[in-house]
Structures are given as C-alpha cells and as structure tokens.
C-alpha cells in the first residue's frame, strides 16, 4: 500500500469512528464500526460486544471506551485463542501496552474521567448508569468525538506498521 493510500485509510477510519459516535454509538462501538471491514465478526455481534464499554466501562469512567475498543480490535486481529499459547499472550499484551502508550502520549491519559476533566470528582459521582441525552450541548462539552478519532488513527497506524495476519506476533 502506498503511503498516500495508507493515510487515506487512516483518515477514513478516523472519520468513520467519529461519525458513528455522532450517530449515537458509544466510544467502543464507534471503534468497532470503523474497523468492521477487518474484524471478521458480524456487525451486530461487534456492537453488542462493545456495548458494555461505553462511558469508561458501563459509565464508571474507567478506561476510555475508545481505548477499550482498539484493544478489542487488536485482540481480534493479533490475538490468540489457545490458553497455553504463552508467546501469543505476551505478544498481544505488548501490542495493547504499546497502543495504550501511544494514546496516553497524545491524550494525556487512557482514563475516561481524566479525559473528561472529572479527575477530582468522587468515584460514586461518576457511576450514574443513565446515559446522557445526545444533544448538541452534549457533543459540544465533551472531547469524546476527538478522542475516538485519535484512537482509530492510532490503531490504523499500528496496523499499517504491523499488518495483521503476516505472522508478526512481535
């Protein structure tokens, strides 16, 4: 793939993830939408799998849903299925740690409440399960759309550097 085509793919995935969020999908689901063409599972299954990870895992404001989303996609693309496959497990954990480090380097954190500027709020105040109404004000006051695009870009760049399925388990 040419460098120009690789950049176009990154931009397409970032755009798709951001648009999915603006359509009402949570952060993790938006990532699954953007990578649907490569993850190898039915769209409904992917969306259901990711549905628990919105709002930093069930709105607990823990690990950002978009970060959880790229970890899920990485598992589908680079993961292992044999419980005794120690090398595969080590390799996947290294990939997850690298993706987290890249995200943290650009966003400052992988923790939802920190990304939302809620770091000083008591944990109990962060866990209302009621999802926010998706209004123009909701989108205006949250960095989520940008953070989701960032996560999609980071994973797509990683995939360009380490194409899945080529035996590169690190």
Image (cartoon, rainbow, N blue to C red):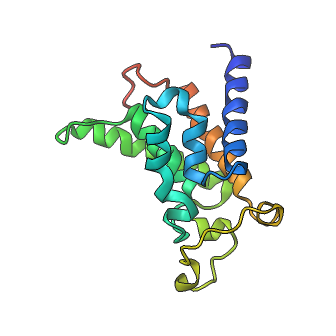
Q: Quadrant of residue 136?
A: bottom right
Can you name the residue that lies furthest to the left here?
A: 84
Left or right, 140 with respect to 118, comes to: right
Q: Position of residue 34 (x, y in %)?
A: 61, 36
Q: Please tell me which residue is depicted at 60% across the width and 33% down the height of the picture.
A: 156
- Residue closer to the observer: 21 or 94: 21
Q: Position of residue 106 (x, y in %)?
A: 68, 52
Quadrant containing the C terminus in the rendered view: top left
- Residue closer to the observer: 163 or 26: 26
- Please say if 141 is above or below 71: below
- Please say if 65 is above or below 114: above
Quadrant containing the N terminus in the rendered view: top right
Q: Position of residue 110 (x, y in %)?
A: 57, 59
Q: Quadrant of residue 6?
A: top right
Q: Please tell me which residue is depicted at 63% across the width and 83% down the height of the picture.
A: 120
Left or right, 49 with respect to 104, comes to: left
Can you name the residue that lies furthest to the top here?
A: 2
Q: How many marks?
A: 0
Q: Please tell me which residue is depicted at 62% across the width and 83% down the height of the picture.
A: 121
Q: Position of residue 67 (x, y in %)?
A: 54, 52
Q: Please tell me which residue is depicted at 22% across the width and 40% down the height of the picture.
A: 86
């Amino acid at each position: 793939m040419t460098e120009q085509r690789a950049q176009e793919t990154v931009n397409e995935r970032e755009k798709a993830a951001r648009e999915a969020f603006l359509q009402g999908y949570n952060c993790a689901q938006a990532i699954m939408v953007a990578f649907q063409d490569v993850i190898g599972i039915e769209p409904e299954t992917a969306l259901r799998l990711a549905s628990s990870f919105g709002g930093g895992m069930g709105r607990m404001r823990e690990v950002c849903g978009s970060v959880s989303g790229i970890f899920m996609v990485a598992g589908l693309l680079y993961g292992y299925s044999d419980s005794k496959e120690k090398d595969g497990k080590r390799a996947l954990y290294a990939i997850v740690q690298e993706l987290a480090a890249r995200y943290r380097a650009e966003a400052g954190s992988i923790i939802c409440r920190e990304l939302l500027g809620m770091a000083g709020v008591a944990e109990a105040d962060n866990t209302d399960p009621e999802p926010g109404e998706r209004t123009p004000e909701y989108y205006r006051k949250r960095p989520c759309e940008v953070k989701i695009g960032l996560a999609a870009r980071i994973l797509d760049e990683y995939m360009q550097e380490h194409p899945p399925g080529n035996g590169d388990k690190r």
